[in-house]
Amino acid sequence: MKVILLQDIKALGKKGELAEVSEGYGRNYLLPKKLAKEANAQAMNEYKNAENSKNYKIAAAKAEAEKNKAALEGKILRIQAKGNNGRLFGSITAKQVAEEIKKQFGIDIDKRKVALDRDIKEFGTYKAEIKLYTGITAALSVQVGEA
């Protein structure tokens, strides 16, 4: 019997997946406990629509990440900071880099997606890697100047 899982089940799969189970396991355990629903015509149609929707969202997110990568790749991000004798007062963080990307390029990036090659505590040019999507990253230079 085919069922569509309504919750993650360790031995069968994740929520929303289609699984083949024995008739007794499905009728006596999964269906009464609302862990799965029978894969009839209506449920299969809903399952296919959900799969198509999920695939479309993934494709749209990848396309957006590729567009953002093209806009960021190889660019120089200029940040002005206060300092003295070549050293900054404090440091430049991933949060500040993400905010400057939003200001200068209009691309909203989560601060957790910004990877700096090392701490920015002095004026100069540094490398940053922006993780836009799984397997899609953009490398850019961060140039810190004195304000």
Image (cartoon, rainbow, N blue to C red):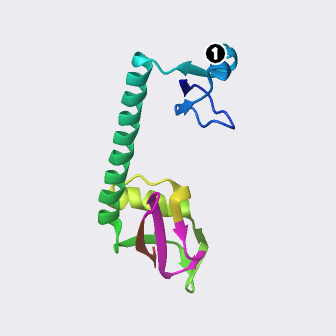
Residue that numbered label 1 is attached to:
27
Q: Quadrant of residue 65?
A: bottom left
Q: Quadrant of residue 141?
A: bottom left
For the C terminus, the quadrant is bottom left
The answer to whether residue 67 is above or below residue 30 is below
What's the residue at 41%, 38% (across, down)? 54
Identified by mark 1, the residue type is Arg
What is the secondary structure assignment of the residue under circle 1?
A: helix
Is 130 colored magenta in this rendering?
yes
What's the residue at 40%, 18% (across, down)? 41
- Callout 1: 10 Å neighbours few (<14), some, many (20+)? some
Is 123 colored magenta in this rendering?
yes
How many numbered marks appear? 1
The answer to whether residue 92 is above or below residue 106 is below
Of residue 72 and residue 99, the one placed in the foreground of this image is 72
Of residue 63 and residue 38, the one placed in the foreground of this image is 38
The stretch in magenta equals 115-136
Image coordinates of residue 112 in percent, x first then y, are: 56, 57
Of residue 134 and residue 130, the one placed in the foreground of this image is 134
Image coordinates of residue 74 in percent, x first then y, are: 34, 75
**Magenta stretch prevailing secondary structure:** strand
What's the residue at 62%, 28% (across, down)? 7
What's the residue at 58%, 25% (across, down)? 6
Image coordinates of residue 83 in percent, x first then y, are: 55, 77
Query: Is 5 left, or right, of 98 in this rendering?
Result: right
For the N terminus, the quadrant is top right
Looking at this rendering, what residue extends furthest in the top direction? 32
The answer to whether residue 9 is above or below residue 117 is above
Query: Is 11 left, or right, of 76 in this rendering?
Result: right
Query: Is 24 left, or right, of 50 in this rendering?
Result: right
Of residue 147 and residue 111, the one placed in the foreground of this image is 111
